[in-house]
Image (spheres, rainbow, N blue to C red):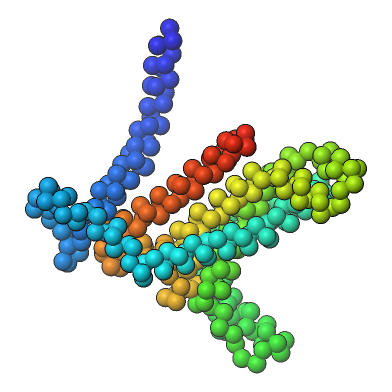
């Protein structure tokens, strides 16, 4: 009887596994195989005369070895620190916003205020990024307002800079920080806050010793949801940073679309995916240790 139930369960799961295998696992396997090949003289793939010699010469690792060159490590480091800074800024902005929404906003206004956080998702991210370009270019709205108010005497260069990229990243990822923080703060047991205050703890102490530890799973979820997309982002840096600010996502995109070096692009993509998987594993282990359900 139990064997029959198990067989039925596998039959019901079969369509899901087929879809995952065809549209997720198979492309990953093909990309992994591509990362071990070499680019041909005119693009495409270089033929392999003898597979044994190819493996023995370690030529299949040439793309991964090339990724350790100083110029690519520099791009990777820039991507990491910009992703870290984006995460820190979104946390610094998002936590007060989520705190106010969850604990201080009137109940009749909560849905409306939370809707304002979700509203950006109603518009394409690409369109919103183009809007930032129009706002911040030399003859854009921001410079016109500053010139009209007499704050500056000439237009500011606020487009195609790392600052422009950072603003775009923070703007784009901020909702992904606010939403998990709000969910964590919303289910916070407020009697614990009252008990801490009754025992003589000040507001700062209650926040530091009670609120933050109890909302740590939401903070961890927000960090993961912001850091990972920021690490592989290429649209914002391409449009708002131009050629002056290349990130790892731009490098991968250029290898596939411009340089036509698909094997090297595949190797970079797999290195990025490995870093992301390690972060997700660390997050899952942290949530398991906290006894919480993984939110991803």
At which x and y percent is residue 129? Answer: 53, 67
Q: Quadrant of the N terminus?
A: top left
Where residue 40 appears, as percent x and y from the top left, is 17, 62
In this rendering, is residue 142 above or below 26?
below
The quadrant holding residue 96 is: bottom right
Left or right: residue 245 compared with residue 94:
left
Side of 172 relative to 65 (left or right): right
Seen from the viewer's position, the closer of residues 238 and 270 is 270
Residue 145, percent from left and from top: 68, 82
* Extreme residue in the bottom direction: 153
Q: Position of residue 267 (x, y in %)?
A: 31, 56
Position of the C terminus, as image quadrant, is top right
Q: Is residue 287 left or right of residue 251?
A: right
Task: Kindly identify the residue that appears in the image at 71 percent across and 45 percent down.
Answer: 213
Which residue is situated farthest in the left direction here? 49
**Of 266 and 154, the residue lying toward us:** 266
**Residue 216 sits in quarter:** top right
Can residue 262 be seen by looking at this rendering? no
């Amino acid at each position: 009887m139990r064997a029959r139930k198990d067989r039925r369960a596998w039959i019901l799961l079969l369509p899901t596994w087929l879809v995952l295998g065809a549209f997720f696992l198979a492309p990953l396997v093909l990309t992994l195989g591509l990362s071990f090949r070499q680019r041909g003289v005119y693009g495409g793939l270089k033929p392999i005369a003898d597979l044994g010699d190819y493996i023995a010469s370690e030529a299949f690792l040439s793309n991964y070895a090339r990724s350790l060159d100083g110029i690519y490590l520099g791009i990777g480091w820039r991507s990491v620190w910009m992703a870290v800074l984006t995460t820190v800024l979104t946390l610094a902005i998002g936590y007060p916003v989520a705190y106010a929404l969850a604990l201080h906003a009137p109940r009749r206004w909560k849905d409306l205020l939370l809707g304002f956080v979700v509203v950006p998702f109603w518009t394409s991210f690409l369109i919103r990024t183009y809007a930032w370009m129009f706002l911040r270019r030399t003859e854009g709205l921001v410079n016109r307002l500053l010139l009209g108010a007499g704050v500056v005497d000439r237009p500011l260069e606020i487009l195609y800079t790392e600052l422009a990229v950072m603003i775009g990243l923070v703007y784009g990822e901020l909702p992904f920080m606010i939403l998990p923080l709000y969910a964590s703060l919303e289910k916070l047991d407020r009697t614990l806050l009252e008990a801490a205050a009754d025992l003589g703890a000040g507001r700062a102490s209650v926040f530091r010793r009670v609120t933050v530890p109890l909302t740590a799973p939401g903070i961890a979820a927000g960090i993961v949801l912001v850091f990972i997309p920021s690490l592989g982002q290429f649209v914002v840096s391409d449009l708002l940073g131009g050629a002056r600010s290349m990130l790892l996502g731009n490098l991968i995109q250029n290898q596939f679309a411009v340089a036509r070096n698909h094997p090297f692009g595949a190797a970079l993509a797999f290195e990025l995916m490995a870093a992301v998987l390690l972060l997700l594993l660390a997050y899952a282990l942290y949530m398991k240790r906290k006894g919480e359900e993984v939110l991803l």
